[in-house]
Structure formats: C-alpha cells, structure tokens
Image (cartoon, grey):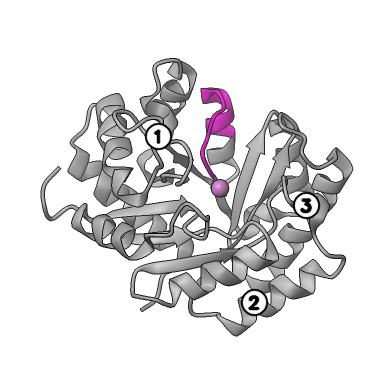
Amino acid sequence: MSKSASLTDSHCHLTAAQFDDLSDVLLRARAAGVEAINVIGYTLEHSLRAINIAGRSDGLWATVGISPHDAKDAPADYASGLRELARSSRAKVVAVGETGLDFYHLISPKDVQIEAFRTHIELAEELNLPLVIHTRDAFEETVNILNELDAPAVGGVFHCFTGAPDEALRAVELGFYVSFSGIITFKNASVVRASAAVVPDSRLLVETDAPYLAPAPKRGKRNEPAFLVHVVRELAKIRGRQPDDIAAVTTENAQNLFRYSG
Ligand code: NI
C-alpha cells in the first residue's frame, strides 16, 4: 500500500481495558494511514468512554449502543441514556450500536436481545443516525426486524460480516453496508472470503474489531487499528484489486454512511 493511502477502521473497541497504551495505539494507526476510526459503544458506560476518546483528536468518532451480549445487564432506562449521550455529543456520535442479535453465543436471552434491537432501531430513526449491526446465527430474524421497523430508511452496516454470499447480497439489497474484519485472513474462512468477493464496491467497509480478531500475520495478538492494513491487503487480493483502491473505496463509503464532519 502506498504511503498516501487513507484507511478507515469502521469498528473497534478502543475503550477496552487492553488499550492502556492508547496514545501509542493512535500514533501507530496514523503512521499506518488509518485516518478515521469509529470507537464503538457496547454498554452505556463504554458509549460515554467512546465519546470521550473520540474527543481526543480529529478523525476519531463514537457510536452509542448496548451490544446483544450486554443487553441483559442494561438499566431499564438505557434508551434515554443513549439518547442523551447522542444528543449532547452530536458532532462526534456517528451511529447507534452496536446492536443486533447473537443467537450463537446467546449471552443475553433471545427476547431481551430482540427487544433491545427494536429499541435501538427506533432510537436510530429518532436521531437520524445509521445502525451498527452485529448478527450471528440470526440473519433471518435480523432482516425481518429491520424490515418491520423500516430500518433501511436510516441504513447502517452489518459489521464483522461472517455470513454466506447470499446473505451479504441480501444486506446490500436492503441498502446496508457490509464490513469485513481480519476474519478474511483466517485459513478456515473461505465462506467469508466468498462473501467479501461479491459485495459491490459501493457497499464495502473494513474494520479491525480490535482488540479482537487480529488478522494474519498478527493472529493471536491484541488487535489494533494499525493492523487494518492486513485486512485491506487481503480484501484487495480477494477482489483482484490494488490495496490503494480498496482503501479509497472503503474510506469514501465510511464518509458517506457516517457523514463525518470536521
Ligand atoms: Ni464490536
């Protein structure tokens, strides 16, 4: 990748305890060409912390949401908490989420996840912000709820996509973006690579999901935004393109979806 390539990490968790060296992490990200980073909230507290981190410098943005894993522990009035956070930091909050359904891990009961997902969609519509969606072993249920609540009107991204090509194309048909992580560099991920080949340029995003899912050749280490270059290179290889092209396309798409300003 050329030195001038500008990359966007559409999804990472810099509020995690593993980032006790955040200043160095951010310097390495910049040195690697990662000029925009979405810091994703997954509880009320981490949504606030994401906003605080986003306030540290240009190119850092935040989302507010309660993840499906954390939905079971959310306070009863979490929706008003998220609304307040988004309204009071309008310039830095670029999406609602991560939210969605995870019927693979089932850390929160299904009904609790579904209720929280619906609440997040309504909040996104009220705030006119896109959605950051996590879905695992629940694609049909996710799409049904998105359609029922008219979520394509606000749009969003299926983050850390792990589904099959037909599901990726259905997400695209719904008007959503599809984001690929370091999973595409894993040996056993041929289905996800097939999905990464079929999403049209105009709907493609990349992410690290750091500190999780470090891409090869960093697999097993703590992930960080600087490692996004490995995701972009693999995606370029899958699509028969130049890494600079993939960097440019995914950065432009992130700007269009998240409407970064300033
Ligand atoms: Ni995440």
Give, as a single range, the part of the protein colored magenta. 159-170
Q: According to the image, label 2 marks what residue?
A: 85
Q: CA distance from mark 2 to mark 3?
A: 17 Å
- The answer to the question of whether label 1 and label 2 lie on touching residues, with beta carbons closer than 8 A, is no
Q: Is residue 175 left or right of residue 61?
A: right
Answer with left or right where residue 34 lies relative to residue 161: left
Crowdedness near tag 2: few (<14), some (14–19) or many (≥20) residues, C-alpha within 10 Å? some
The image's mark for residue 71 is: 3
Amino acid type, label 2 = Leu
Q: Earlier in the sequence, mark 1 or mark 2?
A: 2
Density class for disc 1 (Cα within 10 Å; few <14, some 14-19, many ≥20) is: many
Crowd band around label 3 with a 10 angstrom C-alpha radius: few (<14), some (14–19), many (20+): many
Q: Earlier in the sequence, mark 1 or mark 3?
A: 3
Residue in view at x 43 percent, y 38 percent: 181
Which x, y percent locates residue 64?
62, 65
Circle 1 SS class:
helix
Q: Secondary structure at mark 2?
A: helix
| Callout 2–callout 3 Cβ contact below 8 Å | no
Residue tagged by mark 1? 182
- Was residue 64 drawn as part of the magenta stretch in this picture? no
The numbered mark, 2 or 3, whose residue comes first in the sequence reads 3
The residue that appears at 75% across and 32% down in the rendered structure is 103
Using the rendered view, name the quadrant where residue 167 is placed: top right
